[in-house]
Amino acid sequence: KKAEWAKLKDEKTLSADGKHFTLGANIGTPKDLDGVVENGAEGVGLYRTEFLYMDSQELPTEEQQFEAYKAVLEGVGPDENVTVRTMDIGGDKELPYLPLPEEENPFLGYRAIRISLDRQDIFRTQLRALIRASAFGNLWIMFPMVATLSEFRQARDLFEEEKAKLVAEGVEVSDNIKLGIMIEIPAAAVLADKFAQEVDFFSIGTNDLIGYSMAADRGNDKISYLYQPYNPSILRLVNYVIKSAHKYGKFAAMCGEMAGDPIAVPILMGMGLDEFSMSATSVLSTRSLMSRLNAADLEGLAEKAIDAETNEDVIALVKAEVPEAE
Ligand code: PEP
Ligand code: MG
């Protein structure tokens, strides 16, 4: 199998009937670029920049961030995209030098874009570093844990302000930076048709979207049975997000674990997901699976999955109709 996968390393990702899907890699630091190249990923679908903050003793400077973002953009090169997520701190991700308030429910609290919009000093520094790095590749920026249109608009306005300042300073910047949001809060998924009119792209973060939709923490053994990626409620949200993006000509990606899950992949192909971003080590096996499936045939599978009753029914459905998805 490994030998068969290796042959696909330099190939594009095509279904048996010739439909192209983008298979990106999720990375945490510029060091992870080796894995992206070795596994033939088509760009980076999620660069988790919070590691830059977590691996440091103090807030990373604009210059330090610029160097990291530039390294990733140059490493990926001009033919593929790099989707950089602005800092997703809070929840379980702490910074020793940035004390966060004690909270009853940190996962429902001060985190991610909420911190960025509150601490504009930190956010503007990150945006400047990103915009400066944009001259070195194809940069897509996305904001984590967006719940409302207002949050996206505020983040976009800060981005536009910093970009205008850099242009006025004579700094070379790309005029083709794409702006998107992670869909990981159910409220944003349900309002995807409105968001789609303002963003360039979505990236569905199923790790959090499943947890918040089922109100179940995957780390909690007592209720882990509720962490159900294929529950039709989750599949309906995912499908609605993809269809809403496409209704307005926007791009729909997924960067949660589900994007590399062999049971979910045929359903997501049938829904028309544009980009699947996963850990680099899953890229070749996923490309191999996709190459054996007819995308057109999977539309019916996706419809049946959305209309199913339970998580288990969906697993049984995929196993019966797609024996390749072992
Ligand atoms: C997600 O929530 O699916 C996601 C990709 O973000 P993270 O795993 O970093 O929370
Ligand atoms: Mg998340």
Image (spheres, helix red, strand yellow):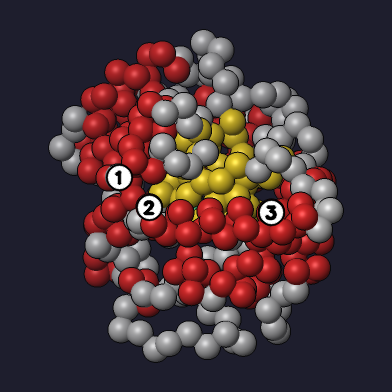
Q: Which corner quadrant of the image does residue 107 belong to?
A: bottom left
Percent from the top left, x then y, of residue 223?
24, 65
Sequence-first disc among 1 and 3:
3
> Which quarter of the image is occupied by the N terminus?
top right
Query: Which residue in the structure is indicated by mark 2?
Result: 149
Mark 1 close to ligand 1, CB under 8 Å? no
Q: Which corner quadrant of the image does residue 50 belong to?
A: bottom right
Which residue is depicted at the point 80% across and 39% down?
Answer: 77
Residue at the farthest left position: 309
Relative height, residue 122 to residue 302 (above, below): below
Q: Amino acid at mark 2?
A: Leu
Query: Which residue in the structure is indicated by mark 3?
Result: 164
Query: Which residue in the structure is indicated by mark 1?
Result: 191
Give the number of the mark in front: 2 or 3: 3
Q: In whole angstroms, how far apart are the C-alphas of marks 2 and 1?
A: 9 Å
Q: In whole angstroms, how far apart are the C-alphas of marks 1 and 3?
A: 30 Å
